[in-house]
Image (cartoon, rainbow, N blue to C red):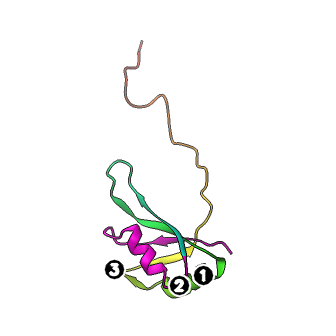
Amino acid sequence: MENKLYVGNLPYAATEEDLKVHFSKAGTVTSTALIKDRATGRAKGFGFVEMSSAEEAQKAIGMFNGQDFMGRTITVNVAKPREDKPRNFDRNRGGGRQDRY
């Protein structure tokens, strides 16, 4: 069991401190991270909370998954490792002049 949790359906007004205070009810929070859009800086509505042990992470899932947090029903489960996805980048499309004969 991992101790890093995915937290989804967060209200956009939530802060990392809000997450830390809320999840501290289940044990010691070692880190929090809210994911934000790079272009706008606006929260994307999900984040990650790391608990100090797998037992505390499991307790947090039991306490908070499907429960209300700041007016929204949140999803809490074990965070999955990030997949390395190939970038959708095509050098032959968009911007710049393409010579046509």
* Above or below 57: residue 88: above
Q: Who's the residue at 37% across and 20% down the image?
A: 97
Q: Quadrant of residue 69?
A: bottom left
Which residue, given by chain and number where applicable, does mark 1 sit on?
A: 56
Residue type indicated by callout 3: Met
Task: Classify mark 3: helix, strand or loop.
Answer: loop
Q: Pointers 1 and 3 in contact (CB under 8 A)?
A: no
Mark nearest the camera among 1 and 3 is 1
Instruction: Give the label on residue 29, or none.
Output: none
Residue 28: percent from left, percent from top: 55, 78
Task: Classify mark 1: helix, strand or loop.
Answer: helix
Which residue, given by chain and number where applicable, does mark 3 sit on?
A: 70
Is residue 15 on the magenta stretch? yes
Q: Pointers 2 and 1 in contact (CB under 8 A)?
A: yes
Residue type indicated by callout 2: Ala
Q: Who's the residue at 43% across and 80% down the image?
A: 22
* The one of 92 and 63 positioned closer to us in this rendering: 63
Which residue, given by chain and number where applicable, does mark 2 sit on?
A: 26
Sequence-wise, the earlier of marks 2 and 1 is: 2
Q: Quadrant of residue 83?
A: bottom right
Residue 82: percent from left, percent from top: 59, 57
Mark 2 is surrounded, within 10 Å at the Cα level, by few (under 14), some (14 to 19) or many (20 or more) other residues, namely some
* The one of 98 and 39 positioned closer to us in this rendering: 39
Sequence-wise, the earlier of marks 3 and 2 is: 2
Residue type indicated by callout 1: Glu
Q: Which residues are magenta?
A: 1-28
Task: Classify mark 2: helix, strand or loop.
Answer: loop
* The one of 28 and 101 positioned closer to us in this rendering: 28
